[in-house]
């Protein structure tokens, strides 16, 4: 995220708390739990980046942990979670972003296992470098898996979340091209507050 370790820590703690509330609300709808848990995952991810800041970047455990969550885990988690929560008539088309996410996650996991990921503190941002081969198709697969699955979900709340994340991606790429991955992840984490409202709207009403 931008600015500092403190900013990441504060934002991450707040977003993780939103995630805990969302998971609590979704307890009676097991199919919604993976998406409800996304703010919790993103909040913990921001807290991990606070550790990257404090380490001054580099290739240490915090950098590796951040990259594992951001790259292969998100690429697979989001389309699986959307598929679980989506209405039945949307599930067939969601197999496309799910397949893209599975392939992209495999490529990214292999890259992390065979290459060294490096974090570099650049002023008020953190840049990550992995030296990925086939950057364009990998990024396309990642975007289809994450943003694409949300936009194809057929659920207004998830489409709104997907649109906000897409705007965050565009802004991050325009303003911080070299630190795009980090800043977009922070924007997505902030947007994930929308998921708390989505879970609350879907919560079963008490009978009577």
Image (cartoon, helix red, strand yellow):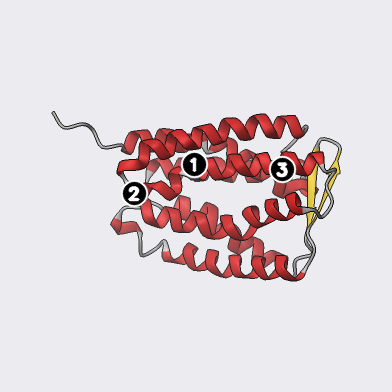
Residue 30's disc number: 2
| Mark 2, other Cα within 10 Å: few <14 / some 14–19 / many ≥20 | few
- Above or below for 124 versus 48: above
Residue extending furthest toward the left: 208
User: Is residue 11 among the parts visible in the rendering?
Assistant: yes
| Mark 1, other Cα within 10 Å: few <14 / some 14–19 / many ≥20 | many
Instruction: Compare marks 2 and 3 and give the one earlier in the sequence.
Output: 2
Q: CA distance from mark 1 to mark 3?
A: 23 Å
- Point out residue 61 in the picture as x, y percentages from the top left corner: 75, 53
Q: Nearer the viewer, mark 1 or mark 3?
A: 3
Callout 3: SS: helix
- Point out residue 203 in the picture as x, y percentages from the top left corner: 31, 37
Callout 1: SS: helix
| Residue at position x 40%, y 47% in the image | 33
- Point out residue 25 in the picture as x, y percentages from the top left corner: 37, 36
Instruction: Compare marks 1 and 3 and give the one earlier in the sequence.
Output: 3
Residue designated by label 3: 49
| Residue at position x 66%, y 44% in the image | 184
Q: CA distance from mark 2 to mark 3?
A: 30 Å
| Residue at position x 48%, y 57% in the image | 79
| Residue at position x 73%, y 56% in the image | 64
Instruction: Compare marks 1 and 2 and give the one earlier in the sequence.
Output: 2
Residue designated by label 1: 161
Q: In the rendered image, which quarter is residue 202 located in?
A: top left
Callout 2: SS: helix
């Amino acid at each position: 995220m931008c600015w500092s370790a403190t900013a990441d820590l504060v934002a991450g703690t707040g977003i993780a708390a939103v995630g805990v509330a969302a998971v609590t609300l979704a307890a009676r709808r097991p199919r919604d739990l993976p998406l409800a848990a996304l703010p919790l995952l993103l909040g913990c991810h921001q807290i991990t980046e606070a550790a990257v800041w404090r380490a001054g970047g580099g290739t240490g455990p915090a950098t590796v942990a951040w990259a594992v969550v951001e790259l292969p885990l998100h690429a697979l988690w989001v389309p699986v979670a959307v598929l679980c929560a989506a209405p039945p008539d949307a599930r067939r088309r969601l197999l496309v972003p799910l397949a893209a996410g599975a392939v992209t996650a495999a490529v990214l996991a292999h890259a992390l296992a065979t290459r060294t990921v490096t974090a570099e503190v650049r002023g008020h941002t953190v840049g990550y470098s992995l030296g990925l081969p086939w950057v364009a198709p990998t990024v396309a697969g990642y975007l289809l898996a994450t943003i694409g699955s949300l936009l194809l979900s057929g659920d207004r709340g998830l489409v709104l979340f997907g649109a906000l994340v897409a705007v965050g991606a565009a802004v991050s790429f325009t303003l911080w091209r070299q630190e795009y991955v980090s800043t977009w992840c922070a924007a997505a984490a902030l947007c994930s507050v929308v998921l708390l409202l989505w879970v609350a709207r879907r919560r079963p009403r008490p009978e009577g």
